[in-house]
Image (cartoon, rainbow, N blue to C red):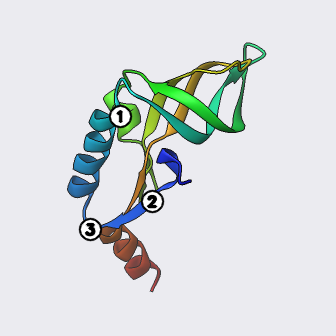
């Protein structure tokens, strides 16, 4: 089984990646699905990843989190409610990621 947050797709531009990331979010908002891991706070101050699988509900997520960038990747954060016992709060997971090829090529050109 492939989890929702296990996909990474090559895409040409940031605009296309942003559109698709928002579409992924809109299609899953308010639904329940399985993810391979979640992240969250525990012991009041620490953060960590919790290996799953976990059944989650996708909650409202701020646009800035949906548009999280990491190098040439658009790696959306999704706020989720874990539907199983988990000793963590403020949980999130990654939505499907996109590798933006125009940025990847630009980085390679700067190195060459």
Q: Name the residue under label 2.
A: 8
Nearest the camera: 79 or 14?
79
Nearest the camera: 75 or 23?
23
Q: Distance between the residues labelled 1 and 2?
A: 17 Å
Task: From the top left corner, tell me how far across and down residue 33 is, in percent.
Answer: 48, 34
Q: Mark 3 points at which residue?
A: 12
Question: Is residue 40 placed above or below 11 in the rendered structure?
Answer: above
Q: Which of marks 1 and 3 is nearer the N terminus?
A: 3
Question: Is residue 102 placed above or below 70 in the rendered structure?
Answer: below
The residue positioned 71% from the left and 20% from the top of the image is: 86
Query: Label 2 crowding class (10 Å Cα cut-off): few <14, some 14-19, many 20+?
Result: some
Please identify the quarter of the rendering in which residue 91 is found: top right
Nearer the camera: disc 1 or disc 2: 1
Nearer the camera: disc 3 or disc 2: 2
Determine which of the numbered discs, if any, sits on residue 28 in the image.
1
Q: Distance between the residues labelled 1 and 3?
A: 23 Å
Are the residues at dot 1 and dot 2 in contact (C-beta closer than 8 Å)? no
């Amino acid at each position: 089984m492939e989890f929702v947050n296990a996909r990474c797709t090559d895409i040409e531009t940031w605009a296309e990646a942003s559109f698709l990331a928002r579409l992924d979010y809109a299609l899953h908002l308010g639904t329940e699905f399985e993810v391979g891991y979640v992240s969250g706070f525990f012991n009041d101050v620490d953060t960590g990843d919790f290996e799953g699988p976990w059944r989650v509900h996708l909650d409202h997520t701020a646009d800035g989190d949906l548009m999280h960038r990491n190098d040439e990747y658009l790696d959306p954060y999704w706020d989720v409610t874990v539907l199983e016992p988990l000793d963590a709060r403020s949980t999130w997971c990654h939505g499907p990621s996109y590798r933006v090829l125009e940025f990847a090529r630009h980085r390679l050109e700067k190195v060459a």
